[in-house]
Amino acid sequence: MAKKLFKIVAFIFISWFIIHSLYITIDGISDQGKNADLAVILGSKVNEDGTLSKRLEKRLESGLDLYKNHRVKKLLVSGGLGKEGFYEGDKMKEFLASKGIPDSLIIVDNFGNNTRLTVENTLKLRSKLKFNSIIVVSQYFHVTRTKKLFEDRGCENVSSVSPNYFEWRDLYSILREFPAYYIQ
């Protein structure tokens, strides 16, 4: 009887994981084409030589496209101080400025050390920046949880865009997102 119960529980858990992973993947790669007041671009690794990881560069290119296509008015870049010794937000701003985004339209959060802090720090700026809508920019597996964090804190108009960039590391990240979504 215990063996049968274990099989049922394992089947339910595995099914739940697969359905959840499919949902976040489909949600993450879907761009509903919405406009927003602000794009929130989440940070990622800056290399030891100060260059951006390919993943981070692709996120920033997605944010750049949003701005150039008049889908957002401002860009908020958020990340922390990496072990490589660089503030992700500062490096992200450098990249966007080098692509012609006016300095006044790039807001830097260098204390967004994780997703929750990025959301909290962004919402603290709400009255100053006067935004009512957000487009979250991150990898496809990450945007569903990020949108949920914003929505749980009262932000109603939240959509997302993810870069068309995939790597083997995504498999690990999808595994990590499963518990992270429910623990937050």
Image (spheres, helix red, strand yellow):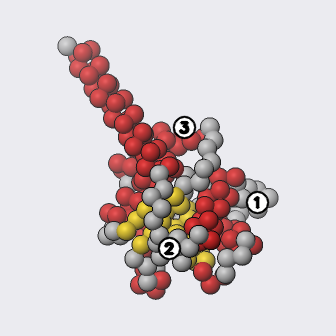
Q: Position of residue 101 (x, y in %)?
A: 67, 76
Q: Earlier in the sequence, mark 2 or mark 3?
A: 2
**Amino acid type of the residue tagged 1 in the rendering:** Thr
Q: Residue at x 56, y 73 (%)?
A: 70
Q: Earlier in the sequence, mark 3 or mark 1?
A: 1
Q: Nearer the viewer, residue 147 or 69?
A: 69
Left-right relation of 181 to 101:
left
Q: Which mark is residue 38?
A: 2
Q: Which residue is mark 3?
A: 171
Q: Which mark is residue 51?
A: 1
Q: Is residue 14 above or below residue 55?
A: above
Q: Residue at x 48, y 56 (%)?
A: 31
Q: Nearer the viewer, residue 119 or 55?
A: 55
Q: Classify mark 3: residues with Cα within 10 Å, few (<14), some (14-19) or many (20+).
A: few
Q: Is residue 151 above or below residue 38?
A: above
Look at the numbered discs 2 and 3 and tell me whether their residues touch, using CB distance below 8 Å: no
Q: Residue at x 70, y 54 (%)?
A: 53
Q: Residue at x 59, y 54 (%)?
A: 163
The answer to whether residue 142 of the structure is visible from this angle is yes
Q: Nearer the viewer, residue 135 or 118?
A: 135
Helix, strand or loop at mark 1: loop
